[in-house]
Image (spheres, helix red, strand yellow):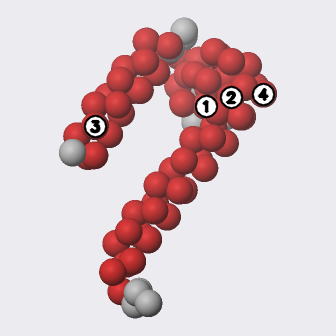
Amino acid sequence: MSIGVSAIFGFFVILSLLFSIQDFDTVLGSEYDQPVLQILVDLYGENGAIALMTLIMVCVYHCGLFSLVSKYSHFVRRA
């Protein structure tokens, strides 16, 4: 269930990023070497893009952390 919901939301995130591209050549030739960051800079400015990319990195980190914790939590002895 959660994989399906994540796939649907991920599809809409990618779709919204694609519709947010203002200049395709600028996104590909970005000085940041990161197309998603360039799209966010175009939309929200540099400070807003830094805040959003930081939020994205924190969310990705916690997603991996929680995945590992849930996978190996059955090894922990419960008192």
Residue 70, image x, y percentages:
38, 68
In what element is the residue under mark 1?
helix
- Which residue type does callout 3 highlight? Val
Mark 3 surroundings within 10 Å by alpha-carbon count, few (fewer than 14), some (14 through 19), many (20 or more): few
At x 54%, y 30%, the residue is 35
In the displayed structure, would residue 71 be above or below residue 64? below
**Are the residues flagged by discs 1 and 2 in contact, CB closer than 8 Å?**
yes
Ranked by sequence position, the earlier of labels 4 and 1 is 1
Cα distance between the residues tagged 3 and 2: 26 Å
Residue 47, image x, y percentages:
78, 27
At x 28%, y 37%, the residue is 5
In what element is the residue under mark 2?
helix
Ranked by sequence position, the earlier of labels 3 and 1 is 3
Q: Which residue is mark 2?
A: 49
Cα distance between the residues tagged 3 and 1: 25 Å
- Which residue type does callout 1 highlight? Leu
20 displayed left or right of 78: right
56 displayed left or right of 44: left
- Dot in front, 1 or 2: 2
Residue 68, image x, y percentages:
42, 70
Q: Which residue is mark 1?
A: 37
**Are the residues flagged by discs 3 and 2 in contact, CB closer than 8 Å?**
no
